Image: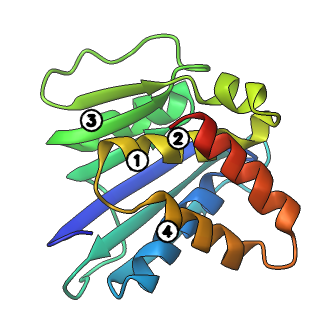
Amino acid sequence: MCNTTTKIIISGFGGQGILTLGQLIADIALHKGLKVTWMPSYGAEMRGGTANCSVIISSTTIGSPMVKNNIDILCALNGPSLGKFLGAVASGGKVFINSSIVDTLPNRGDVDVVPIDATNIAAQAGNAKAANMVMLAGFLKQTSLFTIEDVKEALERRFEGKEGLVDVNMKALESAL
């Protein structure tokens, strides 16, 4: 999964599943025996306001849960999030962008920009609120952090007793693979 440390920021509007996506990634890493931190940040209004979380995955002890710079992976589900965090992405990092909402892609040659039509793909799969799972599909395609089986197991833990939510999220994820 990861030999050193991977710093991830997931950001967007409240209600887009930002914190859930971060929790799923942290859960997967934890169940793989890695060290993990998950730190949420959101406005008081939550739905519609800004929300982000940082996830650090490491094979060694994590000194601080804060991710302020040298971001390895940025997952931006809206334009303000892209603007806020793009400058902190490390050279060679990956920037996943919800191109359903973000019109202009960044022109930064030292990072790998991955546009994903997340909201539209999720809507076509039956639930636009599952755009976070479509973004997660981008992680699966572009990184070696985890597998689709890891995601399914994490969703089953997260939504225990709510199999319908597991199915909706897996359908959105699989539609983007």
- Whether the residues at callouts 1 and 3 have beta carbons within 8 Å, the answer is no
Name the side, left or right, on which 108 lies relative to 151.
Answer: left
Q: Does the image show residue 92?
A: yes
Counting every numbered tag in the picture gives: 4
Label 4 or label 3, whichever lies nearer to me, is: 4
First in sequence: mark 1 vs mark 3: 3
- Left or right: 108, with 171 as reference point: left
Q: Of the residues shown, which amino acid type is indicated by label 2?
A: Met
The residue that mark 4 highlights is 150
Look at label 1 and name its amino acid: Phe
> Is residue 6 toward the left or the right of residue 26 in the image?
left
Where residue 30 appears, as percent x and y from the top left, is 43, 83
Quadrant of the rendered image containing residue 105: top left
Q: Is residue 158 above or below residue 93?
A: below
Instruction: Tell me the mark number nearer the camera, choosing from 2 and 3.
Output: 2
Q: Which residue is mark 2?
A: 135
Is residue 46 among what the camera can see?
no
- Residue matched to label 3: 87
